Image (cartoon, coloured by chain):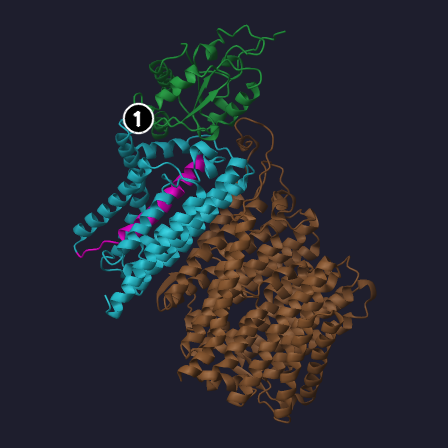
Chain colours: A brown, B cyan, C green
């Protein structure tokens, strides 16, 4: 298939699929279009990767001329969208929403007025960064949609739900392919809309409040984005992302577009101090949390930062402020996650922490750091989606999202417990997933030491809150008659979706060399002109080397051998030691900070983050004064 | 890691000698502590008697998960030591050893027993206290030398990393489970903490894992001295280890156990401060200011 | 195996349990841990956890309330294990042997290897008792099926009204 057609299909097909879902009253049979669209997306994204490789392309440009009516379609939809936001703000009597809607409309009109009829070439630009993101969105997003078929089966408004989910996937793909900055803005705001609709899906009071809060924060980011585009147009005289990046950041006030776009990225990725909207968004159904608020939508912000990073490498102050926001977010959210007992909130904090790490890498801006960021992005998407889906499955059994209620799930739901364990281990432990990235990260940090101190404490905190939780789930009594994984009565849909993500997480860890050489290296080569080498047996970098495959194989063999050959016989089992008593004790959870300390810590972290962002926004002005 | 036959043999010898050496160190530790307390104490080889005796007992478990995690912990710690003696990457050593500690904690959690549970939580707090400091010391070594590969370190880390050495002694106190921070295995408070539901051969496995873990940190300590002459190098490394262990013993015998909050606060504050000051000094020296 | 047999004797970890004694014998047992008597030189460590222990040092005449707990602790000790009854109360229950709330000695609840008399039993006598118990291990051949061999039946317990 023509590669351009694949690219367009990746954007259009899910939108069509979503619209097809709408007439399915009562959700009967809605699995068919969702499944079909999902499979199509997976196939298309893999085809795109294969095509890019076999054609030896490092980037593929699609001109506006070849997709003629799209420009007017997007323009009209853009205005319609902003009108919708303004109307929503008026309807909800929320001044901020209305104000932000208007503040977005005005610059858009200004830009369109000044550059009407100017064609931005190319309209869509596909390089390996876009391919990575679209693989994440299409494959993981599709699996989550398939999972949602079963999860939402008792919901009343399924057509609306699946329509918005699928349209969202199309919007994400559009955003990562867009080279025209206005198109990027349009798709960005579509994702904001989808997020608002999905968070408020259940129409409870809490859901509506959280949805409005999310709308306020992300619209605020949209304001920053459109103003950044307006200023970019006036300073650099272009609406094309590639032209903007190749011209590089000048100094003085011409830095303002980049600072504003970084601000927009921070709101979208819920960095501190904007993390509240993501925490509140956890009232949404679990598939929404898995899709939007961990694997895909929030990655749009860091995608923008990664895209921008080659341009700001010459302005250390700006890059380092971005890195500082990221590192600080990582520390703050990891510490606060230790104090949470609601599982989805822990996962939300963990997502924000991981995005903070990626932001930090984007700020450090060396070839190793960006590779680490991409590896983190991919692995986190897989593992976090898996974790959210497991939490959703567990909720079906325990009817609760509290971690303390998940004690002993190993005996009742062995399949989900194992999938959950794989998810947690691939996020926090070597030699799986995060290993290579943490390692590359630590090495890249030696270029900017102060961040190392912040990140080191964050890593330890990450280990603490994940181990606590995993330990709770894996705690089991002593019994020879334990249900086996094969005979677990989990619904087939959950088995396949959880199992596929778990297998993907483990497989990606083993195949990390291929991931690096086929997906990440091509992008690094085009941007930095050096390559991150990856041979089959080890990954080298300028600061050290290690044999990944050997380690992975040893650990895998160990687990398998022991698991297979160790079967406790009846004589071996013993009761727990409780001083000779024979009744079962229940233990409470351990959440390091008291409520007072938690609020205080939250306030301090928010304040510091606000200061750093204020500095970030002040840098262009300071630079202008100095010049 | 290009190694010739002699290198491989040396590494293998070190790998086998290290846990034996740690066992002897533990025996000597008990002997010296006993003499400090005006009594005789067990023979130096007591640790080996303990280990062999444990292998001869009937195996007893609460569930299979405990054993899986215990053996995983042992494998990871052994791998970490293997990478260290083979002259590999210090960050790899750190991460793999850290994974081993986490595996041990998960093993303690997987038994549904209150003492085991509390012990595991306290062990996590210990990890929260010492892991950042250890990571920062390793990062400082990398910053100083420009590389994390142990085989490439061919000069003494002292005296330029003297404060890092002090930070490592604090980490050593926690890792060797000595007062004032023997929080996880506080005998009088939570019996044996995370070890409580292990018995017989499985307890022996956890003990052995502990030995390998100690060997790793002592191995990092030995990096602080190097000399071209092999005999002087060995003597110097041994004396650093002896001094560090002796310091931890003295601290053990003159302090009482403190609270876990205090442990976290003190270790993080003191450790990070020491490493930060050290790094600043190195930076200033490089700039030519100092 | 010669090595494991020797190690077993060189490293017996003890569990101390009080089944209702006046604490006189308990104080003597704790005195063993002090520098004056120093049983750590024999490799004996005071482990509070039955799963880590080899020797069970019991005091007290086993009140009815604590009987089940004593049995549970004994069962939670992995073989090979030894039981040393310390003091007159633990041996025969005297002077409480006729009381309604007392079982009259540990031998009625769990199998005992060595009885150490005395009220309170002197520390030297206790050490003597432990060494005597360890001697039974010296003369025994341990096989891999130790778990089946060493489970002995306790003496018949008299029914009291």
Residue occupying image coordinates x 38% and y 64%? A450
Percent position of residue A234, x then y: 54, 89
Q: Which quarter of the image is occupied by the C terminus of chain B?
A: bottom left
Question: What is the crowding at mark 1: few (fewer than 14 residues within 10 Å), some, or many (at least 20)?
Answer: many
Secondary structure under badge 1? helix
Image quadrant in which you'd find residue B163: bottom left
The stretch in magenta equals B201-228
Residue A452 lies in the magenta-colored region: no
Image quadrant in which you'd find residue B20: top left
Residue B209 lies in the magenta-colored region: yes
Residue occupying image coordinates x 51% and y 38%? B116
Residue occupying image coordinates x 44% and y 50%? B128
Percent position of residue B203, x then y: 44, 36
Percent position of residue A31, x then y: 75, 64
Q: Which quarter of the image is occupied by the N terminus of chain B?
A: bottom left
B151 relative position to A338: left or right: left
- Can the viewer see residue A509? no
Q: Which residue is mark 1?
A: C41
Q: Which residue lies most toward the right here?
A: A25
Residue occupying image coordinates x 71% and y 68%? A197
Residue C21 or residue C6, whichever sits in front: C21
| Overall secondary structure of the magenta section | helix
In this view, B218 is above or below B288: above
């Amino acid at each position: 298939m023509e590669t351009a057609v694949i690219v367009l299909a990746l954007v259009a097909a899910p939108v069509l699929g979503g619209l097809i879902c709408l007439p399915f009253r009562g959700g009967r049979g809605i699995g068919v279009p969702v499944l079909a669209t999902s499979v199509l997306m997976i196939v298309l994204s893999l085809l795109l990767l294969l095509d890019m490789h076999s054609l030896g392309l490092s980037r593929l440009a699609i001109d506006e001329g070849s997709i003629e009516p799209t420009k007017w379609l997007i323009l009209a939809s853009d205005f319609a969208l902003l009108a919708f936001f303004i109307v929503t703000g008026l309807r909800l009597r929320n001044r901020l929403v209305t104000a932000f809607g208007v503040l977005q409309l005005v610059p858009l009109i200004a830009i369109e007025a000044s550059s009407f009829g100017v064609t931005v070439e190319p309209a869509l630009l596909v390089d390996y960064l876009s391919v990575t993101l679209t693989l994440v969105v299409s494959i993981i997003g599709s699996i989550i949609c398939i999972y949602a078929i079963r999860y939402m089966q008792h919901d009343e408004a399924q057509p609306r739900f699946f329509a918005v989910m699928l349209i969202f996937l199309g919007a994400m793909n559009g955003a990562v392919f867009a080279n025209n900055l206005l198109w990027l803005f349009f798709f960005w705001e579509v994702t904001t809309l989808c997020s608002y609709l999905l968070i408020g899906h259940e129409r409870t009071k809490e859901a509506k409040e959280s949805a409005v809060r999310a709308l306020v924060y992300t619209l605020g980011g949209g304001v920053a984005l459109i103003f950044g585009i307006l200023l970019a147009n006036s300073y650099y005289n272009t609406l094309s992302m590639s032209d903007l990046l190749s011209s590089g950041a000048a100094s003085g006030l011409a830095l303002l577009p980049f600072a504003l776009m970084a601000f927009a990225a921070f709101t979208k990725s819920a960095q501190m101090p904007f993390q509240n909207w993501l925490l509140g968004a956890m009232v949404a159904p679990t598939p929404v949390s898995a899709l939007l608020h961990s694997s895909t939508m929030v990655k749009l912000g860091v995608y923008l930062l990664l895209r921008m990073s080659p341009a700001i490498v010459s302005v250390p102050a700006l890059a380092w402020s971005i890195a500082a926001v990221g590192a600080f977010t990582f520390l703050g959210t990891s510490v606060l996650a230790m104090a949470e007992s609601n599982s989805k909130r822990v996962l939300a904090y963990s997502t924000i922490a991981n995005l903070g790490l990626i932001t930090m890498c984007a700020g450090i801006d060396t070839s190793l750091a960006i590779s680490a960021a991409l590896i983190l992005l991919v692995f986190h998407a897989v593992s976090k989606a898996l974790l959210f889906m497991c939490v959703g499955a567990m909720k079906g059994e325990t009817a609760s999202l509290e971690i303390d209620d998940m004690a002993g799930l190993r005996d009742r739901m062995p399949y989900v417990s194992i999938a959950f364990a794989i998810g947690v281990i691939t996020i926090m432990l070597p030699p799986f997933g995060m290993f290579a990235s943490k390692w590359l990260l630590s090495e890249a940090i030696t270029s900017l030491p102060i961040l190392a101190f912040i990140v080191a404490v964050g890593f330890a905190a990450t280990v603490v809150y994940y181990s606590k939780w995993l330990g709770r789930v894996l705690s089991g009594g002593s019994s020879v008659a334990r249900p086996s994984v094969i005979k677990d009565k989990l619904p087939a849909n959950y088995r396949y979706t959880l199992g596929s993500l778990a297998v993907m997480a483990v497989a990606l860890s083993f195949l990390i060399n291929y991931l690096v050489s086929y997906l990440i290296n091509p992008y690094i080569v085009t941007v930095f002109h050096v390559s991150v080498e990856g041979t089959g047996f080890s990954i080298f970098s300028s600061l050290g080397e290690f044999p990944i495959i050997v380690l992975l194989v040893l650990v895998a063999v160990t687990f398998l051998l022991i698991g297979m050959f160790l079967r406790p016989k009846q004589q071996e089992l013993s009761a727990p030691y409780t001083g000779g008593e024979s009744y079962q004790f229940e233990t409470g959870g351990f959440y390091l900070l008291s409520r007072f300390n938690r609020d205080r810590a939250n306030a301090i972290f928010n304040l510091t983050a606000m200061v750093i962002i204020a500095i970030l926004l002040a840098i262009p002005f300071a630079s202008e004064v100095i010049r | 890691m290009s190694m010739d036959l002699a290198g491989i043999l040396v590494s293998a010898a070190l790998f086998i000698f290290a846990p034996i050496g740690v066992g002897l160190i533990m025996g000597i530790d008990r002997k010296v502590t006993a003499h400090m307390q005006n009594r005789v104490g067990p023979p130096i080889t007591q640790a080996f008697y303990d280990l062999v005796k444990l292998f001869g007992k009937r195996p007893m478990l609460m569930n299979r998960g405990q054993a899986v995690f215990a053996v995983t912990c042992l494998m990871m710690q052994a791998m970490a030591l293997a990478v260290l003696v083979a002259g590999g990457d210090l960050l790899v050593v750190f991460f793999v050893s850290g994974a081993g500690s986490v595996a041990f904690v998960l093993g303690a959690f997987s038994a549904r027993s209150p003492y085991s549970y509390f012990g595991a939580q306290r062990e996590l707090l210990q990890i929260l206290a010492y892991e950042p400091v250890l990571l920062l010391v390793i990062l400082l070594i990398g910053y100083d030398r420009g590389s994390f590969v142990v085989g490439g370190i061919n000069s003494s880390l002292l005296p330029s990393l003297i404060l890092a050495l002090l930070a490592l002694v604090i980490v050593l106190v926690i890792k060797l489970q000595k007062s004032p921070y023997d929080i996880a295995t506080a005998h009088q408070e939570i019996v044996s903490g995370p070890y409580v539901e292990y018995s017989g051969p499985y307890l022996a496995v956890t003990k052995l894992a502990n030995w390998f873990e100690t060997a790793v940190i002592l191995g990092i300590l030995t990096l602080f001295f190097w000399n071209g002459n092999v005999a002087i190098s060995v003597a110097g490394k041994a004396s650093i280890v002896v001094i560090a262990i002796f310091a931890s013993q003295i601290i053990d015998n003159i302090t009482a156990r403190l609270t876990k909050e205090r442990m976290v606060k003190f270790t993080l504050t003191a450790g990070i401060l020491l490493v930060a000051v050290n790094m600043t000094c190195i930076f200033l020296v490089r700039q030519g200011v100092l | 195996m010669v090595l494991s047999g020797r190690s077993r004797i060189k490293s017996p970890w003890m569990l101390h349990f009080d089944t209702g004694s006046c604490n006189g014998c308990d104080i003597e047992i704790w005195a063993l841990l002090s520098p004056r008597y120093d049983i750590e030189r024999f490799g004996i460590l005071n482990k509070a956890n039955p799963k880590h222990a080899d020797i069970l040092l019991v005091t007290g005449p086993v009140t009815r309330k604590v009987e089940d707990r004593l049995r549970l602790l004994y069962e939670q000790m992995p073989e090979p294990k030894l039981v040393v009854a310390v003091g007159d109360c633990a041996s025969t229950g005297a002077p409480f042997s006729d009381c309604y709330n007392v079982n009259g000695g540990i031998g009625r609840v769990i199998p005992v290897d060595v009885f150490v008399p005395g009220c309170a039993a002197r520390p030297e006598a206790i050490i003597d008792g432990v060494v005597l118990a360890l001697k039974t291990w010296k003369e025994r051949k341990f096989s891999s099926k130790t778990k089946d061999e060493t489970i002995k039946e306790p003496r018949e317990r008299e029914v009291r009204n």
